[in-house]
Amino acid sequence: MRSDKIWRFHEQETPGDMKTIPSTEERIWAVFSHLSALLLGIGILLPIISWSEQRRKSNYASFQSLQALGYQSLGYTVWILLTLVIVMAQSFITLRELIPAAAGGADFETLTTMAMGGHYLVTMGLIALYVLLPVMAAIACALGKDFRYPLIGSRLARYLEYDPNQSTEEPVWLNEDHEDRWVVGMGHFCVIIVFWGMLVPLTVWIMQGKRSAFLKFQAIQTLVYQAVTILLNFAALAFYFFGAFVLLSVVGVSGASDLGSSTVMIGFGIFAISSLITILILLFIPLMHILGQWAGYRVLKGDDYRYALVGRLAAKWAGK
């Protein structure tokens, strides 16, 4: 089996050792695909464009582009979750140390400044950690090396049946079905990237929708699903600000001396209801993110995944 040969190849060879040096054009596409991670979101469309342009011209550029796409979607998801855990843990530790120290007579302002400085350093360190690998990847690709991201790279190479040492006379292209599934899966994973995540399915739809009905349908349903998720964020803000506006309006009309009036109580009631709706929506949004991750996983496993309601709507739009 060809996949068995590729597995053995990756066990025996060191990634980066290639028999032929990629052309300047191939290296340029690969370098910019990796460096697009420095834009922290909006650059995610560049690996899609690079893959679309190079997918039947260069296995090297195609693989590096798809690898960059995976790092900026799946890798970003892991990074943002890790960042949230670290920041929450640091905040808890800071409060646990800060409160007793302030109660003991320590300078609260100095302690707060030091705590904020610590949070700033941790945040900058986490951002530096995220952008370090793409910079290393870009440098390696500029030198014509076959760079592999930790955890993702070698697994993706086997998944795509990518062999950097194959003969250039009769090239065997990457596994097309797995290429498409990887792109679609990363589009689902991008639901956690607000706004910019929509660039992946939108770009796939525009550049590859005519070639593949599977890509067209999945791109449309992913785009609609992400749009719904973003609208829920706006709905939560709208409910909260509506309640706050009503409360401030009735308090301003009634005056500070008449806070016990029925009008003010109604205002407090509306604010409480709108705040409750806001909280329920904000609790529902993480479930939408989890479902998006699940959809990406199912697509990579070989399913033609469909979201409830959104999937049927997308199927009609895609003409299936």
Image (tube, rainbow, N blue to C red):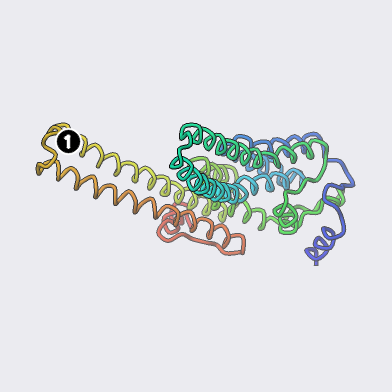
- Position of residue 76 measured from the top left corner of the image (x, y, whole percent): 59, 47
Query: Residue farthest to the bottom?
Result: 1
In the rendered structure, the answer to whether residue 31 lies left or right of residue 81 reads right
Asked whether residue 292 is in view, the answer is yes
* Crowd tier of the residue under label 1, counting other residues whose Cα lies within 10 Å: few below 14, some 14–19, many 20 or above: many
Question: Residue 313: which quarter of the image?
Answer: bottom left
Could you tell me which secondary element the residue under label 1 belongs to?
Answer: helix
- Position of residue 91 measured from the top left corner of the image (x, y, whole percent): 50, 45
Q: In the rendered image, which residue does mark 1 sit on? A: 251
Q: Residue at x 62, y 45 (%)?
A: 72
In the rendered structure, the answer to whether residue 65 lies left or right of residue 288 reads right
- Position of residue 182 measured from the top left corner of the image (x, y, whole percent): 63, 54
Q: State the residue in front, 67 or 121.
A: 121
> In the image, what residue type sits under mark 1?
Val
Q: State the residue in front, 216 or 106.
A: 106
Q: Residue at x 66, y 41 (%)?
A: 129
- Position of residue 128 measured from the top left corner of the image (x, y, whole percent): 65, 38
Residue 25 in the image: above or below residue 217: above
Q: Residue at x 23, y 45 (%)?
A: 271
Question: Residue 265: which quarter of the image?
Answer: top left
Asked whether residue 209 is in view, the answer is no
